[in-house]
Amino acid sequence: MPSGIPDFRSPGTGLWENVDPMEVAHIDAFHEDPARFWHFYGERFATLGDKRPNGAHRALVGMEAAGMLDAVITQNVDMLHRSAGTVELVEVHGSIASCSCVACGDANGSANGEAVPLVRARELVAGAADGVPRCGRCEAPLKPDVVLFGEMLSQHALGRAAAFCEGADVLLCIGSSLEVHPVAGLPLLTRRAGGATAIITQGATPLDELAEVRLDGDVEEELEALAAGLGCG
């Protein structure tokens, strides 16, 4: 957690340790009890909005700028890759950067029909008696532009991710348990296309035996060392 953001599944510290994700982060929970949903997500918005990129994010930006990294594919919704300056970014689970109204349409969250940016969404959460930010046009609850449990991932994002993985000479799998599909299957696309895989994460993954390189040190330290070794740190 170099940026101070807990992951979801680590024993003792993960976000799902004391909360059932199906009760607070499922699309059905959003529709059935938006106040409970936003009690959880409002805290996430308040916490993530103040976080800053760490050395791992900056190392990836350096490698991209040096022409050694084609893209970053992330399951994170925290906007930190954007903030760090990554140019070619695929956010397969969406981002907390904005909210939209599912009643009016995917991009109808505000009075002028545009998605509501994070700063405004946080203001709406703070100003609502029940903690539920609402659409400026129809008053329906706004939904974060992230993929919730029970929702399909963007086929456009998955298609871009698959194309990058199939074309990769080396795929870096960083800080992931490689347990959440379909993203967990992306390294297999690289392998089938003849590319190599390097897994950099603490804790075992289902694909460890298939990786040409396996590093289990601190992700930030490992990536900073890699970038420095490549001359772009």
Image: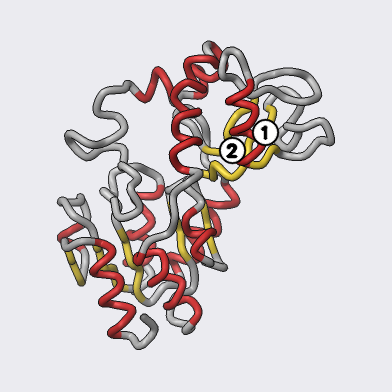
Residue at 78% across / 19% down in the picture?
138
Q: Secondary structure at mark 2?
A: strand
Q: Position of residue 135 (x, y in %)?
A: 73, 25
Quadrant in the picture for residue 159: bottom right
131 lies left or right of 229? right
Quadrant in the picture for residue 5: top left
Asked if the residue under mark 1 is in contact with the one under mark 2, i.e. CB atoms within 8 Å, the reply is: yes
183 lies left or right of 126? left
156 lies left or right of 209? right
| Quadrant that contains the C terminus | bottom left
219 lies left or right of 123? left
Residue at 17% across / 63% down in the picture?
217
Q: Position of residue 57 (x, y in %)?
A: 40, 64
Residue 100 shows which numbered tag?
A: 1
Residue furthest right in the image = 112
Residue at 42% across / 78% down in the picture?
63
Q: Nearer the viewer, residue 131 or 210?
A: 131
Residue at 68% across / 26% down in the picture?
102
**Marks 2/1: CA distance?**
6 Å
Q: Nearer the viewer, residue 193 or 98?
A: 98
Residue 15 shows which numbered tag?
A: none
Q: Secondary structure at mark 1?
A: strand
| Residue picked out by circle 2 | 145
Give the amino acid at mark 2.
Asp
Q: Position of residue 37 (x, y in %)?
A: 49, 20
Give the amino acid at mark 1.
Ser
Please tell me how crowded label 1 is: few (under 14), some (14-19), or many (20+) other residues with Cα within 10 Å: many
